[in-house]
Image: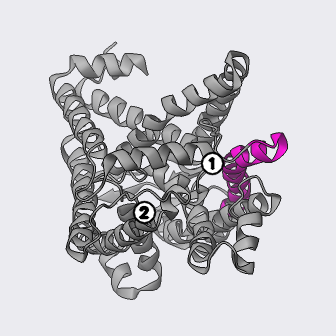
């Protein structure tokens, strides 16, 4: 990996892409530190200090993680890139349900451009709703665990509207940043921004563990975190390769086919989407409990069994949702019948299975078998921090930086970025048979 980066900096074109990506990331981190208009920054800092002392509302922990800490600072990027990610997932799901979206998906680049435009519009709508919710919760003190300091000195409707508008504009700007990285940088811009947000929180969490638990526990945690990262890399790279044989066929005066290849099916075919879906669904009861009030019967039940991340009810429900959404997402993104028809169209077949329905049945059988360990792997890694909180009896304010959603996203984005760099290096300097 280090050799790939060294070679990339030696290539002028790739060096420009890397420096451009770094410049956009720096601009993103600067924007995350600028408070939104109408916000009292000193009072926000005091409320954050009280939140860290009392444990704080864990319902906003994942959103704050994805925003790189900008949410609890009420910065211009407080909404973050989650609206675009949510909109992308929703549009992807609608391509299976809505015939119009399915038709656009099959039209190629023009249809994909239309779907991207729909995703942008939906992102702005979701960002507006989320910005209104953030401003309302911050004004009432619920965002900071009941802090009563006025984070908005001027609560006039015009000031609140300007604050919401700036946060929505910040989310749109982040969407543009991601597209810039995808077009002119290393590619996969939204994932790189999410990687940056999570990596920004790791030094703070590691420093807190070192201060509170001591160097011995910190060293043991680092070794355990390294083992988790190695395991995640191993599983993320694992795949089932189904052999595919292509028959010879004559096109004009040239002979094509007659080659052997394989159809790769990853163990973790769904990526990190099931974890995000499961976390989002668990947020809904917590948000409803905030509206109903913590003293109500529903509020007490949610705080005891769902909001408490060390509760066995929370752990079991979280793992069940991840397994369910893994099967759901794989079922709508990988269609065995379409893959079978594509192979049949180009003269391909799986040895031992006839083209058509037998090939479709075999692909579906393999996919169902390999999705089970992939879903269990996702559930295990995601609930690992919550499991440690339940076993050790730790407080919810403690953070485990090498588990859950953070390590899945960071490892996945890191591997994808390295593969993209290596692929571009191979295009520019392919030695191959010239050695």
Q: Quick one: quadrant of the C terminus?
A: top left
Whole-angstrom CA distance, mark 2 to mark 1, is 17 Å
Residue pointed to by mark 1: 55
Please tell me whether residue 378 belongs to the stretch shown in magenta: yes
Residue 68 in which image quadrant? top left
In percent of width and height, residue 360 lies at: 61, 70
In percent of width and height, residue 265 lies at: 58, 52
Q: Is residue 252 above or below residue 196?
A: below
| Residue 102 falls left or right of residue 394 | left
Residue pointed to by mark 2: 138
| Residue 201 falls left or right of residue 170 | right
Pointer 1 local density, CA inside 10 Å: few below 14, some 14–19, many at least 20: some
Q: Residue at horizontal 30%, vertical 42%?
A: 33
Residue 392 in which image quadrant? top right
Secondary structure beneath dot 1 equals: loop
| Residue 56 falls left or right of residue 140 | right
State which tag comes first along the sequence, 2 or 1.
1
Q: Depth check: give the residue in front, 323 or 133.
A: 133
Q: Residue at horizontal 65%, vertical 29%?
A: 225
Q: Residue furthest bottom?
A: 99
Q: Depth check: give the residue in front, 17 or 174.
A: 174
Secondary structure beneath dot 2 equals: helix
Q: Is residue 168 above or below residue 21?
A: below
In percent of width and height, residue 383 lies at: 71, 50
Colour basis: one colour
Q: What residue range appears in magenta?
A: 367-394
In percent of width and height, residue 183 lies at: 20, 48
């Amino acid at each position: 990996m280090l050799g790939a980066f060294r070679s990339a900096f030696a290539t002028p074109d790739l060096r420009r892409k890397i420096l451009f990506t770094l410049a956009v990331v720096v601009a993103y981190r600067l924007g995350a530190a600028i408070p939104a208009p109408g916000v009292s920054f000193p009072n926000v800092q005091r409320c954050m200090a009280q939140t860290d002392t009392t444990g704080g509302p864990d319902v906003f922990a994942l959103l704050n993680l994805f925003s790189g800490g900008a949410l609890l600072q009420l910065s211009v990027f407080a909404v973050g890139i989650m609206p675009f990610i949510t909109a992308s997932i929703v549009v992807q799901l609608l391509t299976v349900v809505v015939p119009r979206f399915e038709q656009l998906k099959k039209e190629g680049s023009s249809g994909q451009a239309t779907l991207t435009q729909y995703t942008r519009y939906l992102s702005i709508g979701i960002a507006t709703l989320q910005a209104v919710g953030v401003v309302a919760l911050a004004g009432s003190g619920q965002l900071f665990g009941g802090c009563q300091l006025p984070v908005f000195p001027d609560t006039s409707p015009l000031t609140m509207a300007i604050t919401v508008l700036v946060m929505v504009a910040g989310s749109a700007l982040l969407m543009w940043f991601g597209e810039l990285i995808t077009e002119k940088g290393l590619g996969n811009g939204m994932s790189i921004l999410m990687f940056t947000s999570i990596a920004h929180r790791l030094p703070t969490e590691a420093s807190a563990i070192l201060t509170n638990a001591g160097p011995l526990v910190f060293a043991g945690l680092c070794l355990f975190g390294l083992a988790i990262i190695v395991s995640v890399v191993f599983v993320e790279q694992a795949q089932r390769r189904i052999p595919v044989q292509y028959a010879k066929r004559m096109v004009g005066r040239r002979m094509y086919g007659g080659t052997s290849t394989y159809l790769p099916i990853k163990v973790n075919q769904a990526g990190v989407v099931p974890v995000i879906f499961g976390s989002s669904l668990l947020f809904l009861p917590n948000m409803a409990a905030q509206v109903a009030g913590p003293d109500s019967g529903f509020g007490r039940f949610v705080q005891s069994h769902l909001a408490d991340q060390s509760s066995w009810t929370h752990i079991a429900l979280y793992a069940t949702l991840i397994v369910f959404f893994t099967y759901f997402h794989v079922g709508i993104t990988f269609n065995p019948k379409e893959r079978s028809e594509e192979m049949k169209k180009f003269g391909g077949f799986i040895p031992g299975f006839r083209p058509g329905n037998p090939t479709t049945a075999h692909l579906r059988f393999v996919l169902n078998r390999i999705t089970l360990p992939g879903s269990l792997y996702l559930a295990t890694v995601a609930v690992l921090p919550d499991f440690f909180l339940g076993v050790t009896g730790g407080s919810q304010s403690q953070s485990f930086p090498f588990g859950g959603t953070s390590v899945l996203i960071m490892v996945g984005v890191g591997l994808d970025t390295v593969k993209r760099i290596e692929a571009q290096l191979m295009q520019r300097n392919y030695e191959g048979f010239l050695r």
